[in-house]
Image: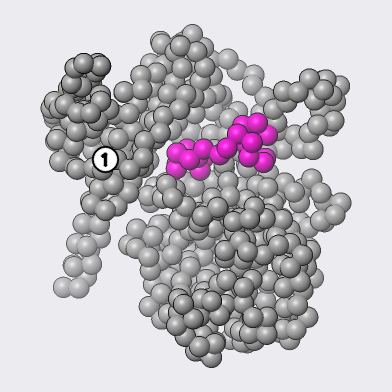
Amino acid sequence: MSDRLIIFDTTLRDGEQSPGCSMNLEEKLRMARQLDALGVDVIEAGFAIASDDDFAAIREVAKTCRRPIIASLCRTVKEDIERAWGALADAARPRIHTFVATSDIHLQYKLQKTREEVLEMSREAVRLAKRFTDDVEFSAEDATRSDMDYLCEIIEAVIDEGATVVNIPDTVGYTIPSEYHHIISTLKQRVRNIDKAVISVHCHNDLGLGVANSLAAISAGARQIECTINGIGERAGNASLEEIVMALRVRKDLMPYENGIVTEELYRSSQTLSNITGVQVQPNKAVVGKNAFAHEAGIHQHGMLKNRITYEIMTPESIGVKTNSIVLGKHSGRHALKAKYEEMGHDLSRPELDKAYKLFTKLADQKKEIFAEDLMAILQDGIASIPERYKLRNLQATAGTSTLSTSLVTLHDTTGDAEKTDTSSGDGPVNAVYQAIDKITGMRGTLMDYTVRSLTKGDDAVGEVFVHVEFDDTAYTGKAASTDVIDASARAYLNAVNKAIYSKDRRKAVGSEQLAVGS
């Protein structure tokens, strides 16, 4: 049995299904490039049949990332499989990943099908997928709550049809390590052709056991681990890629398995995802959390000063966190800023650097010293990956305990190179600003969530605003940061507006293309 583990990343598919973590095409491409740099073996780029946007994202990731395997998820349905292949056709290394539920709970209440019907569906799906590519993965959804005899039967059947990877997912985070080890061991013992396929595991974290279950499965013989950056995903999320990889590295004495992950890219990957989604990891998150290498207790600090190994089982440098060697201020230039971002794990292109530097100099005029948190705020606010239809030019807002809140907003419309101004009143200055933006853009948004937090300390602290806004029953996220919270609130909302406009224009463009093809 090989001691090489395959790291299958599903951040762009299962991870994106996490509330507030949806990504547009450009954001998915940016994340995919980082996953490629991280060294993952497989990138599951999406669910092709789910939407035109998902289809386009899979196709572009397949064209862009040539080293890793690119996978598309699909149900055991003919249209799904054909759509998946349509998105993967240009991939250097395509994989069709088809799935169906196998637990009696799902068969009875969700699929309303018999075991025999699902068995035949699985056979036909793998058979069809093999017409398009040799690399076919089959997943038995809710495997850990499935009857063991039936699970063995269906796994054996799909391998007979040519499945090269068989996934045994803990879909609802139900199992525990000893039980999961037994399930994988039983499959290896009882499925006669199991040696012809790689066993994969996909663990959810509903009981906080996603990583532990994944490691237990490895010891039982699984050789592909499906996981996500920062552990994002449905409900409580998926097994965390960075935790699995660093557990394997730190405890190689007990788990002597190889993988191709460049661990020094882990922190950059975590930060890239947080920057794209606006969802920050909790401070005490293992490996990549803000406090992962922080020591406050006096006893710990004393030990650390003597030798870091007393309280650190891995070094910050091993995951790509470098020590602070550059102090930035108003007199710093582009080279210093670029070097600092590289220290933090962000390699900016020249256009991105120019945009970041412009925001940096503006902030440096307001603050004596720029901290890493300020630079992250600039990234989150300023390095947008979608076209900005509207840009904030001017903002005035008034508020008081006995007066009506009002706003005056001026936006620059880039399509017509014109400035538009409008006023509004509302229930507080933020609401007044948002109503004025709605008047100018013609977009009527419903604010679903509004979060503000301080990124830095002091009276001149940078505040970050993160919003969820619904336009035409579709939710979009927006984020921005500034020393002025009203300014950040306006630009966060405008960020969501621009995303909604961009998505609307893309749907129109796709519809026109399909109409042209049809005619």
Pointer 1: what residue? 497
Left or right of 368 on screen, residue 260:
right
Q: Secondary structure at mark 1?
A: helix
- Residue 69 is situated, as x and y percent measured from the top left of the image, at 56, 63
Front residue of 110/258: it is 110
Question: What segment carries the magenta color?
Answer: 272-292
- Residue 494 is situated, as x and y percent measured from the top left of the image, at 28, 35
> Quarter of the image holding residue 286?
top right
Query: Residue, x 85% and y 30% (percent of image)?
Result: 310
Q: Residue furthest front?
A: 402
Crowding around mark 1 (Cα neighbors within 10 Å: few <14, some 14 to 19, many 20+) is many
Q: Could one spot residue 132 in this view of the protein?
A: no
> Quarter of the image holding residue 367?
top left
Is 314 placed above or below 470 here?
above
Left or right of 99 on screen, residue 144:
right
Q: In what quadrant of the picture does the C terminus appear?
A: bottom left
Is 186 placed above or below 426 here?
below
Q: Amino acid at mark 1?
A: Val
Q: In what quadrant of the picture does the N terminus appear?
A: bottom right
- Residue 448 is situated, as x and y percent measured from the top left of the image, at 33, 43
Front residue of 323/307: it is 307
Q: Could one spot residue 199 in this view of the protein?
A: yes
Query: Residue, x 51% and y 43% (percent of image)?
Result: 273
